[in-house]
């Protein structure tokens, strides 16, 4: 029952869902707007129940081998002197670059993927869904799942405009490649001015450093696909290039063709399904990068959705509500991100001083200035 399932988005959630659906006898097809796998991105954590999901896919040894081996966060002053360090190592969690994880997931997911295409429209009826693509001929599927991120086109088609579900969290962020000589190996080095953060991320297992930027702002009016506009926004926000190493980071980031910019935002929905269509991953519940839980939620949520469909014999009328009820409590916990944002981006100079003082306390696995 309902064997033919279209998944929009070759994301962590999309590929994980395709893998487990295929394992359970379904026939998934993935459509991805990009011409190939999106292999960029920052470090993501595989932790708690997500570890069991990845182990079940047989790729946990490779995940551990590709771990970023980052020890923690280091806060510095304008002279690049460390004022505090936070050790974030967790023996129950493995951080891996998003692109590495996506590549591993693709390697164990033998399904049809339509690259360079997207869903243009769909019509549901009692027996299935007719899907119109931007390029490929229209096809019939039994079910459709959106795994196409916070700005999900499928969610817009089925559930309504983005502004109904995306909640701005007062910040914007960007990351891109940085000079490999910048920053301390195995640490994320962060420099703050009120309401802003510029940082360098140095994996212990990857030669390429990453530049990070976060700034506080009310909602801005821009096209989320216009990279040139994104670069102007970051350049304007960090116009004081002489502070710390901000100028070097900006030069490297703005030259990176995979420069990424977006709002720090969350997706809040009362239901993740409508008829024969469901959502998974950031399209359904984006907790924002500040949560540190994007990959965990995607892996566990996709596994649960596939499992509920299998347990219900493919009956989406049973499976979709059960998936929603099982996964929503975890999403609710992970969307509580207030402390993380205040830690990384204090609003005031006084807030930064308090943060640095707290970071030197041993109570929270924190170490004093180097």
Image (cartoon, rainbow, N blue to C red):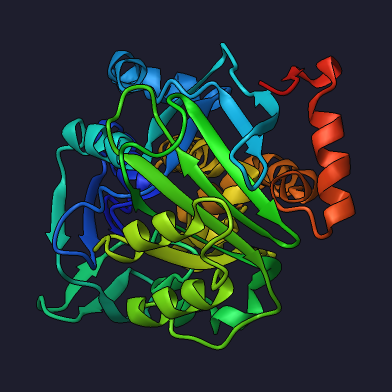
Q: Residue at x 86, y 31 (%)?
A: 358
| Side of 163 where 119 appears, left or right | left
Locate residue 251: give its quadrant.
bottom left
Q: Residue furthest bottom?
A: 221
Res. 27 visible in picture: yes
Where 109 falls versus 228 (above or below)?
A: above
| Side of 217 where 202 appears, left or right | left
Residue 15 % position (x, y): 30, 44
Q: Residue at x 27, y 64 (%)?
A: 255
Number of disc labels: 0
Q: Residue at x 43, y 76 (%)?
A: 230
Residue 184 % position (x, y): 46, 29
Nearer to us in this view, 327 or 215:
215
Residue 266 % position (x, y): 64, 62
| Side of 92 where 18 appears, left or right | left
Where 287 falls versus 21 (above or below)?
A: below
In the picture, the quarter occupied by the C terminus is: top right
Where 158 falls versus 73 (above or below)?
A: below
Q: Residue at x 24, y 73 (%)?
A: 118
Residue 122 % position (x, y): 33, 80
Nearer to us in this view, 4 or 61:
61
């Amino acid at each position: 029952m309902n064997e033919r399932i279209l998944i929009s988005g070759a994301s962590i959630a999309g590929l994980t869902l395709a893998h487990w659906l295929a394992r359970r006898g379904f026939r998934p097809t993935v459509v991805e707007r990009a011409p190939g796998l999106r292999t960029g991105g920052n470090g993501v954590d595989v932790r708690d129940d997500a570890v069991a999901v990845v182990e079940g896919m047989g790729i946990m040894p490779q995940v551990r081998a590709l771990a970023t081996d980052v020890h923690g966060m280091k806060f510095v002053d304008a002279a690049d002197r460390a004022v505090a360090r936070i050790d974030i190592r967790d023996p129950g969690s493995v951080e891996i670059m998003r692109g590495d994880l996506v590549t591993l997931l693709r390697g164990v997911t033998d399904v049809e993927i339509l690259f360079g295409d997207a869903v243009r429209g769909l019509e549901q009826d009692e027996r299935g869904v007719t899907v119109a693509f931007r390029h490929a001929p229209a096809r019939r599927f039994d079910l459709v799942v959106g795994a196409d991120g916070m700005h999900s086109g499928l969610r817009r088609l089925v559930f309504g405009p983005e502004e109904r579900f995306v909640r701005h969290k007062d910040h914007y962020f960007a990351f891109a490649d940085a000079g490999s000589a910048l920053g301390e190996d195995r640490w994320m080095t962060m420099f703050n001015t009120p309401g802003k953060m510029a940082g360098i991320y140095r994996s212990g297992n990857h030669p390429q450093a990453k530049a990070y930027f976060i700034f506080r702002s009310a909602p801005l009016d821009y096209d989320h696909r216009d990279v040139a506009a994104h670069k102007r926004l970051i350049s304007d926000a960090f116009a004081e290039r002489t502070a710390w190493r901000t100028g070097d980071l900006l030069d490297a980031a703005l030259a990176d063709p995979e420069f990424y910019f977006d709002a720090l935002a969350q997706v809040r929905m009362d239901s993740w399904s409508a008829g024969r269509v469901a959502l998974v991953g950031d399209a359904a519940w984006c907790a924002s990068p500040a949560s540190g839980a994007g990959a965990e939620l995607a892996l566990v949520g996709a596994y649960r959705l596939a499992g509920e469909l299998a347990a219900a014999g493919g009956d989406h009328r049973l499976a979709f509500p059960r998936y929603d009820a099982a996964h929503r409590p975890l999403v609710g916990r992970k969307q509580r991100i207030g402390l993380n944002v205040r830690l990384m981006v204090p609003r005031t100079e006084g807030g930064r001083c308090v943060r640095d003082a707290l970071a030197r306390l041993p109570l929270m696995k924190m170490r004093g200035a180097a």
